[in-house]
Image (cartoon, rainbow, N blue to C red):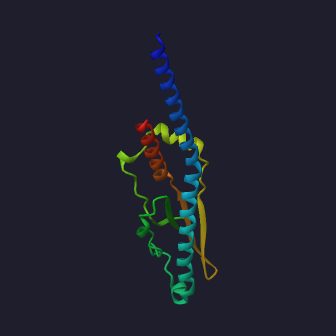
Amino acid sequence: MNLKIRINLIITLIIALVMLLGAGVMVENAREDIRAEVNSTTVLALHLLDAEVLHYTLDYDWANTYNTNKDTIFRLQNLDNVRHLRIEYFDARGRLRDSNSLPKAKEEDAPPLWFKKLISKVSPSLEVTRRPIVINNRLLGEFVITPDPSYEIAEIWHDTFGLMGLG
C-alpha cells in the first residue's frame, strides 16, 4: 500500500472516530435533555391541574352537587397539544373518565427502533405521577400523568442524523 492511500485511510478513520464520538456525546446528553423536558412539562401540568381543582374546591355549590356519573369536569381533551405527557383522569372507582389522548408522532418523523432502544438504555426511566383529587373531604378520583419522551427522542434522532449526514 503506498503512502498516499495510508494517509487517506488514517484521516478517514480519524474523522469516522470523531463523528462516532460526537454522536455518542449527543446520545449521552440526550439523557438529561429528555429528563428536563419531561419533568418541566409534568410540573407545569400539575400546577395547571391543581389550579383547576382549586377552582372547583372554591365553588361550593358545584362541589355539593357533583354528579359522579358525569364523564368529566376537567376537559383534558383540550390538552391534546401537550407533547410529552399523557394526562388521564380516573374517577374514585378507577374508571378512566378523561384523557388528553396523546397524539402519535408522524411515522416519517419516528427514529428507528434501534435508536429508541439505545436512548432507553441511556435515559433513566421516567416515573408516572399520580395526584389524588379530594374536594370537600371527598375523593373524586386521581390524575395519572404518564411521561412520553418520544418527541424528544425524535428530535435527538434528527440532530444526530444531521450530524452524521454532515460528516
Question: In the drawing, does residue 1 fall left or right of residue 139?
Answer: left
Q: Position of residue 93 (x, y in %)?
A: 55, 67
Seen from the viewer's position, the closer of residues 68 and 10 is 10
For the image, the number of numbered tags is 0
Q: Is 79 on the left or on the right of 44, as rendered?
A: left
Q: Is residue 92 visible?
A: no
Q: Residue at x 61, y 70 (%)?
A: 132
Tell me where residue 112 sits by quadrant: top left
- In this view, which residue lies farthest toward the front? 3
Q: Residue furthest right?
A: 137
Residue located 35% across and 45% down the image: 108
State whether residue 1 is above or below residue 81: above
Closer-to-camera residue (163/96): 163
Looking at the image, which is closer to me, 77 or 162? 162
Residue 84: % across, % down: 49, 58
- Name the residue: 61% across, 55% down: 127
Q: Quadrant of the C terminus?
A: top left
Q: Is residue 124 above or below residue 39?
A: above
Which of the two residues, 125 or 153, is positioned nearer the viewer here?
A: 153
Q: Residue at x 45, y 69 (%)?
A: 76
